[in-house]
Image (cartoon, rainbow, N blue to C red):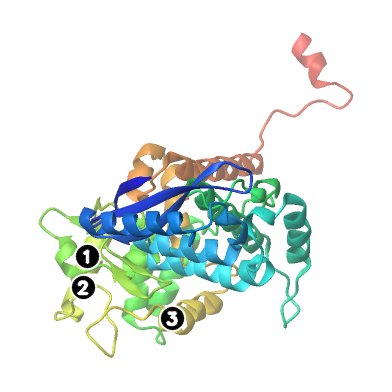
């Protein structure tokens, strides 16, 4: 019995707890509500202890603790930790769409591995109204979310074991990068610049994407106060989040990075500044002072430019892939590329290294030159001579 102090991103909270016996006669904690001060948590502790003594909290009350209640407590704990809105939305969607309807009514300590394996075999065969099945990626998300919720329950003594550990995720084949060769990129940029239908902004977006390897969210969130023409540098510190549709004051890796302009990018940015002198964002919306609208840009500009140019299966993130692969093909170092792209782990960057190496190997067989061998004479015979 006692009070536990917990640190969140912006504040410290206190939570009281008492011990009970679970259905396996093992000691577990019953947690009270989170409080802002230790004094309030102490009052919560007295309330819990009084309820335990009076019998309001049965000494083995976990028999009636449902998965729905566990899931709701899990979501509340994630909110308390101030997870990203997109993360909270992800967990909420998985729980409410798949897990609560299937097992929400069941007691957490009655959910067995065998039961879950049967339930997940049905998940894999489930079809939506349009006839589509759950994708392999979505299936894995459901499995991993279930494991996470049960691990939370074990850590907080709300359940005694994790039955989801018995369910295996599906091994998904690694998707190939969308990539353009250098000459193809130049042809595409030339096509877009000369296309009377296109506005100037798309051309400059592509130019920055192919030359700097920025994420599309980083391009959308780029502001003029982050551009330093004197030192020819760009600070990447904000990103537009596609899920919640807002500009975040930090990048995907929660860190800022400094990139340096080449001559092409410097000239392009100076041209944009002349065209849109009063815009806060480097790539402005035509109808407001805000940033470009991702949905309109993708469907009305990028998609049409790609189709009219004649490229298939190329997305906006392909500009980042193209930059990374061409950088490595031009003898760039993986460690430098990691810093440029803002990867938290070198493992992510090494995927580009493997792709670039495999690509170059596939091209070595294009040119094969050697001396002619006389008819009836083997190469081995010539070597012996």
> For the residue labelled by badge 1, is the local secondary structure a helix, a strand or a loop?
helix
Marks 3 and 2, how far apart at CA: 25 Å
Residue 280 left/right relative to 190:
left
Nearest the camera: 254 or 9?
9
Specify which label sits upstream in the sequence, 3 or 2: 2
Instruction: Say whether disc 3 or disc 1 marks the residue closer to the N-terminus.
Output: 1
Q: Most extreme residue toward the top, as rendered?
A: 385
Q: State yes or no: discs 2 and 1 in contact (Cβ < 8 Å).
A: yes
Q: Quadrant of residue 199?
A: bottom left
C-alpha gap between disc 3 and disc 1: 27 Å
Residue, x 60% and y 62% (percent of image)? 67
Q: Where is residue 278 in the image (x, y as percent from the top left)?
A: 14, 81
Residue at point 28%, 56% (across, down): 41
Q: Mark 1 points at which residue?
A: 267
Q: Is residue 82 left or right of residue 322?
A: left
**Which label lies toward us, 3 or 2?**
3
Q: How crowded is mark 2: few (under 14 residues within 10 Å), some or many (20 or more)?
A: few
Q: Residues within 10 Å of mark 3 (few under 14, many from 20)?
A: few
Q: Mark 3 points at which residue?
A: 295
Q: Can residue 237 be seen in this view?
A: yes
In the picture, which quadrant includes the N terminus?
A: top left
- Give me the residue at 55% from left, 59% from top: 178
Where's residue 76, x and y in %?
Answer: 42, 64
Q: Residue at the far right: name it.
A: 376
Marks 2 and 1, how far apart at CA: 6 Å
Residue 194 % position (x, y): 39, 79
């Amino acid at each position: 019995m006692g009070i536990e102090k917990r640190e969140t991103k912006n504040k410290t909270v206190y939570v009281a707890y008492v011990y009970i016996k679970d259905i396996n006669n093992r000691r577990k904690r019953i947690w009270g509500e989170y409080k802002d001060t230790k004094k309030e948590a102490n009052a919560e502790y007295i309330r819990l202890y009084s309820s335990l003594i009076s019998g309001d909290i049965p000494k083995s009350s976990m028999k009636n603790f449902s998965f729905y209640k566990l899931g709701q407590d899990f979501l509340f704990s994630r909110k308390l930790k101030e997870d990203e809105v997109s993360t909270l939305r992800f967990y909420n969607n998985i729980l409410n769409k798949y897990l609560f309807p299937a097992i929400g009514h069941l007691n957490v300590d009655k959910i067995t591995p065998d039961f879950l394996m049967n339930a997940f075999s049905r998940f894999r065969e489930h079809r939506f109204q349009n006839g589509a099945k759950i994708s392999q990626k979505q299936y894995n998300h459901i499995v991993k979310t279930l494991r996470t919720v049960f691990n939370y329950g074990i850590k907080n003594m709300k359940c005694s074991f994790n039955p989801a550990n018995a369910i295996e995720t599906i091994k998904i084949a690694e998707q190939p990068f969308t990539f353009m060769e250098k000459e193809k990129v130049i042809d595409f940029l030339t096509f877009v610049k000369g296309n009377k239908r296109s506005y100037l902004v798309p051309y400059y977006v592509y130019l920055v994407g192919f030359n700097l390897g920025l994420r599309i969210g980083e391009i959308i969130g780029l502001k003029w106060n982050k551009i330093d023409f004197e030192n020819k540098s760009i600070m990447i510190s904000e990103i537009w989040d596609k899920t919640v549709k807002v500009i975040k004051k930090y990048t995907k890796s929660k860190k800022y990075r400094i990139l340096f302009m080449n001559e092409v990018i410097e000239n392009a940015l100076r041209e944009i500044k002349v065209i849109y002198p009063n815009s806060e964002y480097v790539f402005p919306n035509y109808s407001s002072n805000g940033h470009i609208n991702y949905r309109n840009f993708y469907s009305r500009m990028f998609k049409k430019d790609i189709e009219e140019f004649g490229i298939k299966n190329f997305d906006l993130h392909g500009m980042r892939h193209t930059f990374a692969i061409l950088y490595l093909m031009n003898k760039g170092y993986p460690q430098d590329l990691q810093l440029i792209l803002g990867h938290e782990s070198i493992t992510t960057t090494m995927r580009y290294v493997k792709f670039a190496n495999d690509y170059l190997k596939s091209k070595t067989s294009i040119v094969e030159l050697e001396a002619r061998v006389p008819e009836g004479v083997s190469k081995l015979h010539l070597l012996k001579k």
